[in-house]
Image (spheres, rainbow, N blue to C red):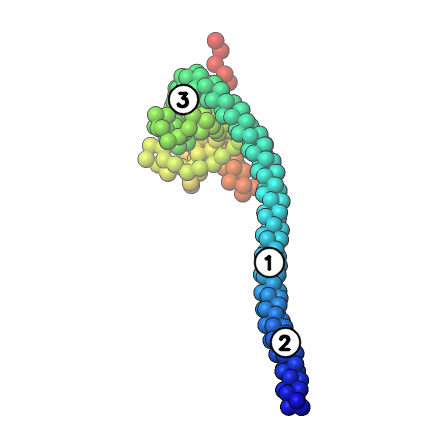
Amino acid sequence: MYVFKTAKRVARVAIPLAVTFFVVAASAATVKDVTATGNQWLVAQVESQKRVDAMADEGRDIADQYRTTLRESEGLKLYLQQLRAQLKSQEEEMEAIRQESAELDRTNIEIQPLMVRMLDSLEQFVALDVPFLKQERAGRVEKLKEMMPRADVTVSEKYRRIVEAYQIEMEYGRTIEAYKGKLADKEVDFLRVGRVGLFYQTPDGAETGYWDRDKKDWTADDDYTEGVKEGLKVAKKQTSPNLLIVPIQAAASK
């Protein structure tokens, strides 16, 4: 009886131990699962947070790009407004240039004959004038005539040079000048007093004369040797200006 009771007690003790072992084993398995699940959840949370952060960064980038695009858009609008204003101004300027060009064409048609007449008059004037610096003055007119048909010289430049030639001729009437030249194969000093008198004198002073307008020829006259000699000094700036006594022809009566 005693043995039976003991065995029975052992059996009763073994059953709770088995149940406890099973519970402990089950609990251990549950903790591992919970831990693994928790780790997976944490990993998922980290990954999710990373995606959220990435989306937030992307959103900020998009917002920055949007603001930048807005600023650029406003800048482009202002630029286009300025460009339209410039284009309008250029169109108006081109229209003004077209009108000026048309007027210039009409002016050129009118000024070409005028310049030709001015050159003809200048050529005749030089030919009929007192014969001082004859080659130089005739050469100036000839160069102007050669210039007229040239396409590489503008109309304004042609007109300027013709007017300049007229100004040079006008200046001759207000100045006194001495220059060397030849007269009947003789070396002489010429004295020009404005346009009212043209004289000559040999370097040794042995012969003095003047241009006779009526005869259209040179006339020797030694009575004015000293006057011409003094005039040559004044013209050459070898002495101060003084009263000159030289023959001046009176204008021919009509």
Q: Where residue 133 appears, x then y in whole percent?
A: 41, 31
Image quadrant in which you'd find residue 240: top right
Which amino acid, mark 1? Ser
Q: Under tag 3, what secondary structure?
A: helix
Q: Is residue 33 visible?
A: yes
Which amino acid, mark 3? Leu
- Residue occupying the point 39% across, 30% down: 153
The answer to which of marks 2 and 1 sits earlier in the sequence is 2
Q: Under tag 1, what secondary structure?
A: helix
Q: How crowded is mark 3: few (under 14 residues within 10 Å), some or many (20 or more)?
A: many
Q: In this view, does 50 lie to the left or right of 190?
A: right
Q: Name the residue under label 1.
A: 48
Q: Do the residues labelled 2 and 1 touch (CB within 8 Å)?
A: no
Q: Name the residue under label 2.
A: 19
Q: Mark 3 points at which residue?
A: 119
Q: Where residue 126 appears, x then y in whole percent?
A: 41, 24
Mark nearest the camera among 1 and 3 is 1
Q: In this view, does 153 lie to the left or right of 7?
A: left
- Residue occupying the point 50% across, 16% down: 251
Q: Where residue 37 appears, x then y in whole percent?
A: 59, 65
